[in-house]
Amino acid sequence: MARRFSAPYQQEPVSGLATWSRNLAIFSVVAVVVSIIIVRFGFLEMKPALATFFGALGCAALSILVGLAAFAAIWQNGSRGMGRILLAFLIDCVVLAYPAYLAYQYRKLPPIYDITTDPIDPPKFEALARLRTGEGTNPAVYAGLYSAERQRVAYPDIETVELEVPVDRAYEVTLRLVNRRKWLVIDERPPQLPRRIGRIEAVARTPIMGFREDVSIRVTPDGEDSRVDIRSASRYFDADLGSNAARVAKLIEDINTAVDNANAKPASKKPQAAPKAPAAKAVKK
């Protein structure tokens, strides 16, 4: 009797929808990276960069919908591809997590973009003013009392920094902290007679997308002490999602800490001379 061989085992085909879901998720990551590079290096204007970014988010959302359809198809016909769906969902969550957090911040925080420690007489953008004249940029003048009132309610702790050090010392500490943050310093003018007002203008960047936010710092004498006022304003958009307030608050904290640590250092003591050895007595012969 001839031996019969069974037909070789055939695997179920991979779901095409699962493959599309994974590919869309990967494409969304690439598009996000490209949009970040465009903004940080200024290859294109802001609108094309944002269009690329929101297109990437759209691809991630579409990947989720296609993945759900693929899951339903696999459940019905038993085809393979569940691993691709799970990978797509993982990538989509990573891509959409930060924008979802920003959307939450947008609903939670007031729609303001200009933060200052002195709303009555805020530090001016002088050298930075020429950088805020392009299409879609916010004006160089302060946003006004409406913004100041919203700031007072949302960020009541942002106030002028009062230091018990001379104005020269306050300026030196502040400039050192600005340089440590690697902000792009556009203009720096130390306090000099008879003006006695120090100014620093610099450009900071948001952590992820690298959007430019302008910073102006004014250091003025207050008798033998000094005062530091800070202003940070987004160059684009009418809401900063709290980035300027966080920047100003952190700089205030660091200035106070640096000055307090310097004042707390004890004065260096002069080294004591080593005790002299007793003189040798003469030996009587």
Image: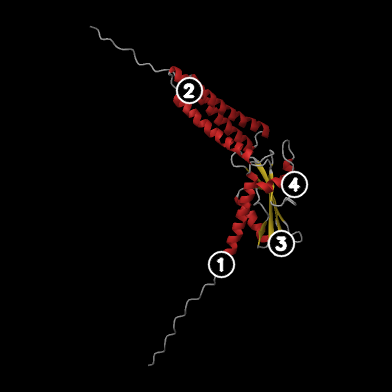
The colour scheme used here is secondary structure
Q: Amino acid at mark 4?
A: Leu
Residue visible at 65% across and 54% down?
175
Q: Which residue is mark 1?
A: 266
> If you read the primary sequence from the N terminus, does the residue marked by circle 3 or circle 2 appear first?
2
Disc 4 packing (10 Å; few <14; some 14–19; many ≥20): few
Dot 2 and dot 1 residues touching (CB under 8 Å): no
Q: Quadrant of the N terminus?
A: top left
Q: CA distance from mark 1 to mark 4?
A: 44 Å
- Residue 37: image quadrant is top right
Image location of residue 202, percent across then percent down:
67, 48
Q: Which residue is mark 3?
A: 222
Q: In the visual, does 94 lie left or right of 122?
A: left
Q: Is residue 142 visible?
A: no
Does 4 appear above or below 239? above
In the structure shown, which secondary structural element does the residue marked by tag 2 occupy?
helix
Dot 3 and dot 2 residues touching (CB under 8 Å): no
Image location of residue 235, percent across then percent down:
69, 41
Disc 1 packing (10 Å; few <14; some 14–19; many ≥20): few
Image location of residue 72, percent across then percent down:
48, 21
Q: CA distance from mark 2 to mark 1?
A: 69 Å
> If you read the primary sequence from the N terminus, does the residue marked by circle 1 or circle 4 appear first?
4
Dot 1 and dot 3 residues touching (CB under 8 Å): no
Disc 2 packing (10 Å; few <14; some 14–19; many ≥20): many
Nearer the viewer's eye, disc 1 or disc 4?
4
Nearer the viewer's eye, disc 3 or disc 2?
2
Q: Quadrant of the C terminus?
A: bottom left
Q: Which residue is mark 4?
A: 145
